[in-house]
Amino acid sequence: MGDNPQFITENRERILAVENSFMPGGKPLLTPDRVLIGEGRLMKLCRRKPQPKVFFLFNDILMYGSIVVPGRWNNHQKILRLEELEQVNLEDGVGMKNQWLLRTPHKSFHISAASVMEKQAWMDHIERCRVERLKQLGLPAESLKPFAATWIPDTASAVCMRCSEPFNVTQRRHHCRHCGFVVCNSCSKGRAILSHISSKPVRVCRLCEKSLHEKDISNEGITRNKDSMKEMPEYEESSDEDQENQTHNAWFTAYSEPEPVYCYFNPKHIKPQCRLPQNI
């Protein structure tokens, strides 16, 4: 990569284009050693329903955001560091075919692809980049931090998963940040600092609050804070742009091709329109 001026120029232009698509609220993305490996649209299971998100895989991070204008403008930029990321392969679920789980200490969630082939391509590329990143940083393959709980979708339960009270207009749904259960406000008044998620107190259910207190693990980075009773966000911000029905993925041959090309990965094709990089 370092000996190919054309690739350096094209990679820089691609990263700047991605960066500008998230402006003015996006974070700077261009760094000397960062390479854009690929991009595409995947479904992310949010609190209320699956939502289309645009994903960008770099050699050191996985970034995603909500789609405002397809191919032009995105917002709600989120960045996951590959050295903290773990993938879990899953069977097809109700309403979520070709799904798998992304886990990090800060956030864990389900995503799905348009086809089995596309899912495998994403998982393979992410894993290769993750392994290379761990080698680069000299880190062990297994994460030393606990992973954030995966939130159970709102639609999965019509009642509080702790007290069984039904949800309605006045009895709103909340999520325990420690176990991911859907709970009511009465069952989630407690707050705790989960250091792998946030330095600020977050909402936890009664059972988790009691468990954390009984285990007396405050010296390990998880402490209760009764004084902090700030209202937690009612739902994760996400785009309602769900009318797109075609999935587009593009992979960039960063290492295996002498002259990197913009590669489209289309599920309708038996094979990709050009070879995906095998060593990234």
Image (cartoon, rainbow, N blue to C red):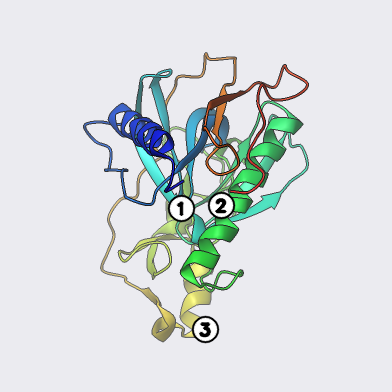
Q: Position of residue 191 (x, y in %)?
A: 37, 65
Q: CA distance from mark 3 to mark 2?
A: 37 Å
Viewer-nearest residue: 186 or 41: 41
Q: Secondary structure at mark 3?
A: helix
Q: Secondary structure at mark 1?
A: loop
Q: Residue 272, relative to residue 222: is it above or below?
A: above
Q: CA distance from mark 3 to mark 1?
A: 36 Å
Q: Position of residue 69 (x, y in %)?
A: 38, 17
The residue sitting at 48% across, 53% down in the picture is 107
Mark on residue 215? 3
Identify the amino acid type marked 3: Lys
User: Quarter-wise, where is residue 241 in the image?
Assistant: top left
Identify the amino acid type marked 2: Cys
The residue sitting at 53% across, 69% down in the picture is 146
Q: Residue 114, relative to residue 190: is it above or below?
A: above
Q: CA distance from mark 1 to mark 2?
A: 7 Å
Viewer-nearest residue: 93 or 130: 130
Circle 3 residues within 10 Å: few <14, some 14–19, many ≥20: few
